[in-house]
Structures are given as C-alpha cells and as structure tokens.
C-alpha cells in the first residue's frame, strides 16, 4: 500500500467511526457515506483529488437521490443500466454552496500528522452542513422551491 492510499484509508476509517452513529454506512471504494431513506438515499462524499506533492486534496460533497425521479429520468435517458442506481437527483460540493462560501471546505492531506485535524474538520462539516442539508431537502417540493 502506498503512503497516499494509507492516508486515504485512515481518513475514511476515522471519519466512519464518528459518522456511523448517524446511520450512515461507509462505502470505502466510493469514498462516501450512505444513508438509506424512504425516498432513496443521502450521501456525504469525500472526493480525493491526487496532488503532485504526493498527497491529496479532499473536497466534501452532498448528494441526494429520489428513486421516483431517477426511475422516470432513466426511462428516457439511455444512461447505461449498470450506472443507474448510483445517480443522484441533486448534488453539490460544500464549497459551492452560497451559505458556505467563506468557510474552508477543501483540505490538503500530505502526511499522517494531518489526519486527525482533517477528520475533525470533515466531521464538523458533516454535522453543521451535511445533516441540515439532508433535512432541508428531504422532499421534492423543497428541491423544486430552491431550483425554481
């Protein structure tokens, strides 16, 4: 295992310990935390971008899927069937959200000494941004109102 892979696995492992009590399950290969809902799912995704310095840049994102919307969309989309279960209805990087423009929502990870601090920051974003986002957009009318 490379040092870079070790760093990624450690961040996901430690973050999982903090997020698990909120009924989110780690999907390690996708670097995301999944919560099944009555309407589909919520995901807190950590995008790991490779950097030239041998480390990562981490970018947390939020995804919500409404099965009813995606089922209708995929009837006409010609999107490859094997990918249809993973498509979100809405999604955004935290750094792109208007309410959070001033906060740090990207983290550079180059060594083991940064892991705990980054995990704490990612968990803080989970509690203070992701969870309220998932509550706010837990129905289609809220999404429609926001978009239209």
Image: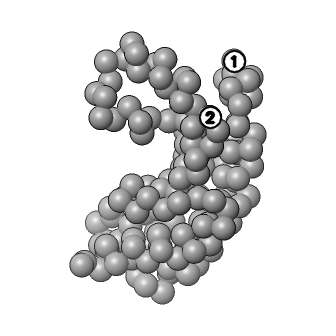
Q: Residue 107's spot in the image, x, y percent?
A: 51, 66
Q: Is residue 80 above or below residue 31?
A: above
Where, quadrant-wise, is the C terminus in this rendering?
A: top right
Is any part of residue 48 visible from this angle? no
Q: Label 2: which residue?
A: 39
Residue under the image location 32 percent in, 24 percent down: 79
Is any part of residue 130 visible from this angle? yes
Q: Residue 96's spot in the image, x, y percent?
A: 59, 43
Alpha carbon distance from label 2 to label 1: 21 Å
Q: Nearer the viewer, residue 45 or 79?
A: 79
Crowdedness of circle 1 by 10 Å Cα count: few (<14), some, many (20+)? Answer: few
Q: Using residue 146 as the reference point, say whether residue 33 is left or right of it.
A: left
Residue under the image location 58 percent in, 51 percent down: 35
Q: Using residue 86 as the reference point, say whether residue 132 is left or right of it.
A: right
- List the single residue furthest toward the bottom: 113
Give the quadrant of residue 21: bottom right
Q: Residue 139's spot in the image, x, y percent?
A: 71, 31
| Mark before the other along the chain sequence, 2 or 1 | 2
Where, quadrant-wise, is the N terminus in this rendering?
A: bottom left
- Element under label 1? loop
Q: Nearer the viewer, residue 49 or 86?
A: 86
Q: Label 1: which residue?
A: 148
Q: Nearer the viewer, mark 2 or mark 1?
A: 2
């Amino acid at each position: 295992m490379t040092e870079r892979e070790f760093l990624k696995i450690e961040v996901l492992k430690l973050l999982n310990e903090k997020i698990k009590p909120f009924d989110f399950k780690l999907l390690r290969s996708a670097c995301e935390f999944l919560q099944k809902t009555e309407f589909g799912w919520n995901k807190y995704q950590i995008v790991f971008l490779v950097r030239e310095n041998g480390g990562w840049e981490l970018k947390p994102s939020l995804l919500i899927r409404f099965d009813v919307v995606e089922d209708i969309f995929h009837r006409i989309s010609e999107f490859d069937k094997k990918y249809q279960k993973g498509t979100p209805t809405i999604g955004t990087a935290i750094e792109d959200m208007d309410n959070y423009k001033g906060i740090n929502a990207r983290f550079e990870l180059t060594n083991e000494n940064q892991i705990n601090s980054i995990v704490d920051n990612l968990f803080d974003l989970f509690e203070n941004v992701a969870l309220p986002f998932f509550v706010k957009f837990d129905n289609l009318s809220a999404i429609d109102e926001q978009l239209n």
